[in-house]
Image: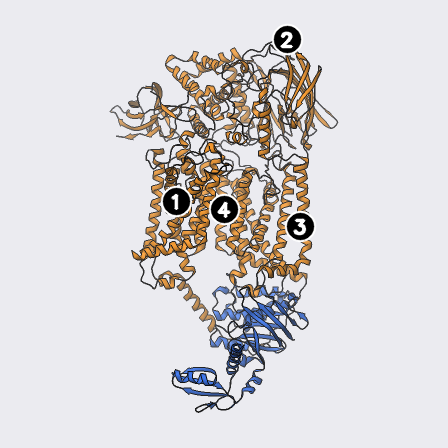
Chain colours: A blue, B orange
Amino acid sequence: MALTITGLSKTYSNGVKALKNLSLSIGNGMFGLVGPNGAGKSSLMRTIATLQDPDSGSVSLDGIDVLRQKDEVRRILGYLPQEFGVYPKISALDMLHHLAVMKGMTNLGERKGSVDALLQQTNLWEVRKKALTTFSGGMKQRFGIAQALLGNPRLIIVDEPTAGLDPTERNRFLNLLSSLGSDRTVILSTHIVDDVRQLCPRMAIIASGELLLEGSPAETLAALKGKIWSKVVATDDQAQALEKQLQVISTHLVGGEHEVRAFANASPGEGFSAVECDLEDVYFLTLARHGSSHMVN
Amino acid sequence: MRQLWEFFTFELKFRFKSLSTYVYFFIWIAFSFLSVASESFGPIGNSNGKVLLNGPYANTYNDVGAAIFGIIIIAAIFGTSILRDFQRDTYQVLFTQPISKFAYLGGRWAGSFVTTVFAFSGMMLGTYLGTFAPWADHTRIGPNHLWTYLQPFLSILVVQIFFIGSIFFVVSALSRKIFIVYLQGAALFVIYLIGITVFFTTRSLERFWSGIFDPIGIILMDDVARYWTVVERNSLLVTWSPALAHGVFLYNRLLWMGVGVLSLVILWALFPMSVEALTGRVQSRRAAKAKEQEVAEAAPVQSLVAAHLPRVHQTFNSSTTWAQYISLCRLRMRNIFRDIPFWGIVALLIAFNVNNGYFAGHLAEQNVWPVTYLMVQAVEGSALLFLYIVAALYAAELLWRERDANFNGIHDALPMRESTDWLSRLTAIVVVEIALLAVAMFMGMFMQTILGYHHYEVVEYLKELYLVTFPQVFGFVLLALFVQTMVSNKFVGHGIVIGLVVMIPILFNFGWENTLYLVGNVPQYTYSDMNGYGHFVPAIFWANTYWLAIMAVLGVVSIALARRGADDSLRARARQAARLAPRLAPFAILFAIVAFGAGGWYYYNAHVLNEYLDSKARRDIQADYERKFKQYENLLQPKVTAVDATINIYPERRSFDGSVRMTLQNKTSQPISQIHITDTKQSVSNLKFDRPFHPVNSAPRDLYSIYALEQPLAPGETVNLTCNVGHETRGFRDGNELPEFAYNGTFFDSDYIPYIGYRTDFEIDDPRRRREEKLPPLEEMAHRGDPVHSVNNIFPREADWVTYHTIVSTSSDQMAIAPGYLQRQWEANGRKYFEYSMGSTHILEFFSYISARYQSKRELYHGPDGDVSLEVYYHPTHTYDVDDMLASSRAGLDYYQRVYSPYQFSQYRIFEFPRYRSFAQSFANTIPYSENIGFIERVVKPTDIDFTYFATAHELAHQWWAHQLIGADVEGSNMMAESLAEYSALQVMAHKYGRDLMHRYLRHELDAYLRGRAGEVRHEPPLALVQREQYVWYQKGGQVLYTLADYIGEDKFNLALHNFLMRYRYANANNQVDASDGIRAAAAIDGAYPDTRMLVEAIREQTPPELQYMVDDAFNRIILYDNKAISATSQKTPDGKFKVTLDVQARKMQSDGNGAETPVPLADYIEIGVFSGKRDEERPLYLKKEKFTEDHKTFEIMVDQEPTLAGIDPYNKLIDRNGDDNMIEVTRK
């Protein structure tokens, strides 16, 4: 299973350039797509999910031309959009059965088994006969993943699935995703970097419709090893002063004081200590570099 | 107060920034502008051609119209004002501020009110602008007076806006749900429609409460102004005076303003000004939901260890597509069936069905059997509105469902075809429509059961509802889906869809009558029990096929352009369409071919096989005829004296052919060298005279031909005319099918044989249309005594009396009839032949040819002057009134032979014909009688009016009043046929049902007369000078003569009629050459026919001197009384009797032809009466005609029993515009 995205560009009618000549290759397993809001993640995912045509570029999935053979893609696709609503006055069970039929699961026994299993998996079994409109945000999100998993899709696209979930739910949800096995492609978009670290063997960072970084979290972390430094300063002025001198990745307010994290090959100065780098540093650094390169341009 | 002002100005600013306010304003400008600028638009322009289009009545009436259709605009402005805060959640911010309830509600309300008043003020501006339209009919535009605009606007529209707006405002503020506001609007509308139906189908004479409780104004206007004459309509405003129509208008306005105020008070009391309270219900529901969720969350978490999902197989083939389609259909139907407003619509539909079903075919106090065609018509008529609402509403709802629910991300990525998805939406709506039609059908049969009619014709229901109507609804659904696919906002879509529906009748009115471009239209058709859908079937079928195929093409386009995915720009959808084209194009092409084929075939039939003439084109022909040939109107022509016709009817082809031989005799003193022939039906060919002649001139369409005789026809000389006649029906027409020809129930008359000379009855008589055609005002009939016209009779002028012989043939399963005694009957060539002859008896030159499959009932009437065979020929299932018709015929023969003269024939035959035309008509001893006026009547209650009995007696009376005595072709003569027949029938009816019950019938006759004169387009003549005014010769004539007979005595009055009849009947019958055995005068010159002067004289002779004034009033004047009981009290006397003190008022007015009245001094006898028992079942205790010489009079009357009612002219014998205040309850002292 391999998804190859080549030179994808998309400009909306309001002039926003959502994708800029973006190319990316995605193999089996979980693939994390991170980026700030408006980076083009959703545009990219909608394009792969056949919901939107790019202005140029191509997407191919194991020989299927995604942009033309939409129906072939839809047959193997499980898609959870970033935001979705539900029909009024219909239960989770009925809706899943309907969607299962739509996904070609015409054998009633098999369909029933699959729907029941998914309801169990997503912990919606007890409420399966309740109207979807009465569901809480988390329950609705779990319903969303259940419908995305209907029919054992080989390509699963989940757009910001953990947004608005409480920690328990988020955890449960990520576990479910990671249990899906490695024989399929799962594209997970998020702006929460932690999600990716936990789940994804491979990841990409995009911003302003461009690919900034692609690789495995482990590789990218290794590249930064020993180059992230941290210092705690008391005042805003001090923090701002550091920002001018150094390549500051992030600042956090901790107990009224600023923890400043900076990127440097060697200790940037007094009071800095080397710290374990995490994926968030990679993310911020990539974004910061991208931002400055833009300024240069 | 400052806050109030702020809210008010904020609301105004918001409204005046919004485009919709100006759209509403423009709608009213357009509506009222067209009402003035185009006579084909709006109720006033279309009706009476003398009512000013910008006069007070027109402005008031148009404002009432705006009040009905304006409900939706009032709802849109008032209903959304408060709701806006809740839809946008601004209430959270708003209600945490310290604002006063009065300021908030008051400001919003006042802002909405001012906005709405502004929008509706477009009515005044539009009317004003309309008066300047150069193409408008300026004879109907009076000077513009501000008050004539402002008064109706203030007293109708501003009051409506105030109270309806307030109700919407309150409902939306208290419910805070848009669909409750919609539902309330719809419910108001439908309930009002129900009320209107009840009121008008029962022809209720209740004029007080019905007007007061009318929230919109249609009934109110009818109650106030129904009898207003043209003069009054052009000068009087509907004022708030307690004297106007008993103050109905005043009380109505006060009542509804009170309702408006009350609702605002309720709102003030109930509206909570806090976020908690406003969202209280929602919050408690939210709390319940949250709790439920907690329970759900707390449920044991399933182990995630065994995370392997079962393997499933996905198959994608045609059976999957089918399964997807079924699943989607179920989902979408569930969307509709679980929608509360849908059930609201169903409930309203059922209520409407029950109501209209109950009144199926009812007219006034006439009761009919709810036969299937009436019931289908009733339930279908009431269902249609709902079918279209459902189609428009759910086309939008289902098409936008995924987007509205924000489920499109998931839905659009499902592996299904666009067509599967789209078809499921279509199917769901169509299934719902089918179900609603089934509801209508079920309700129809249910109502038939309730009404005691058990002859269920399920097939007829199915045909009408599912074969005729359903395709139209289906097409409309497709159209609505297409529109909603194309537009980007569903409310814009609704607007377009409603606009298309509303436009069609308007366009039709404007003369755009072609089915091929009137979207979704099907030509007019009528179901008849006798003929089924008959010849209408092909036109209905092809029109339906044509439009359905066009809509199907639009359907395919809708699939191609369906919204799918995130990008619904037209470019993206065009790309999708291109992708889908290979698969969809074949269907589009197929449907397009069907559309072209069906349309082509329709065009070939309606425009090639038949000449296509819209109503304007038909009027042009009439106008052309008048312009060119009116000059010959008084040209001396010979008269027809004998007719011999051979007519072959081919019912299965709706055609006939034949030949006619007419004997013409010069009954003038001048030689005649030219013979002119009118042939309005284009049915005459091969016309010849049996002496040398040559054609001089012939008009297009063979309408008028002039032949010159080489040797002029000398006075007294005869010439024979022979010609072929015939009519060939080719294919079908775009509506306007000739009603004369049917597979079962052919009935045509002498219009299809040549007419000698010019026909005035072919002229356009509507003054509006005459102006349009640039014709001068319709020529008045000649005065009585006019030497030229007096030698002709009024109908038909081309003959005096004729002898008549005919052979009629028809197909072997039918019977063919013409006037005359059956001489012979035989079969040949698989056809049936009938020979009829009138022998030597003279009849008017007026024949009918009838052919149908009949059942018959005959009986022999043994009269003093010989036997008469009474025969009724009827459709086998229409047995209800056959005996009633026979009974009426017997009673009529008894009465008329006793008081008038012997019956001149030995047979009297009634023939049913299809209900394409609604009348009964008296030919010599032959009465074609429409299936829907006498054959399904039902007399259940003693108060039901036996109209069949009446109509049969009326037609029988024409055998005397027309077929024995016919008047000259001058003003007044029509009443000597129609009023005297009406009078005769009233007497026959009175002898059966009693004088008291006649009062009930005459009330409706009086109502019809007064309404008739209110709609007069020329000028109302007195009875003795009547020209074409049916309301005068039927309703006024019958009433006035019946009253006259009551005053001077039935016997005396009848003696007068007898004397008149015996002296003047059969004028000019015995001075001609014909087939009779009578005198064959070689040189006979026509003398004068009688006119109303002779009739009036005959009545005067029998009238005592003190009642001579009544003869004058009845015949020579238009007299209106305003009699009124003012008070009545009773006192028990010691001897057990009751002394009634009755105070009454009497007034008498004389009106001119335009309705301007002048008071007349009283010297009149008016009846005074005291009654016991309930109103409408009262029994007279005392009844006496008293002489009045002054307005007021008080009577003291002794009666034996306890009185309940008393009054002046209690039986409404005199013509009184306020007949309902003549009686009053007697109060006991």
Label 1, label 2: how far apart the Cα atoms are = 75 Å
Most foreground residue, B750 or B839: B750
Taking the view exactly as shown, the residue that stands out farthest to the right is B829
Q: Quadrant of the N terminus of chain B?
A: bottom left
SS assignment at label 3? helix
Relative image position of residue B1177 (x, y in whole percent):
39, 29
Mark 4 against mark 1, which lies toward the viewer? 1
Label ID, residue B1080 = 2
Label 4, label 1: how far apart the Cα atoms are = 28 Å
Q: Amino acid at mark 4?
A: Ile
Q: Amino acid at mark 2?
A: Arg
Label 3, label 4: how far apart the Cα atoms are = 36 Å
Relative image position of residue B532 (x, y in whole percent):
62, 36
Label ID, residue B350 = 4
- What subunit carries mark 1? B
Label ID, residue B160 = 1
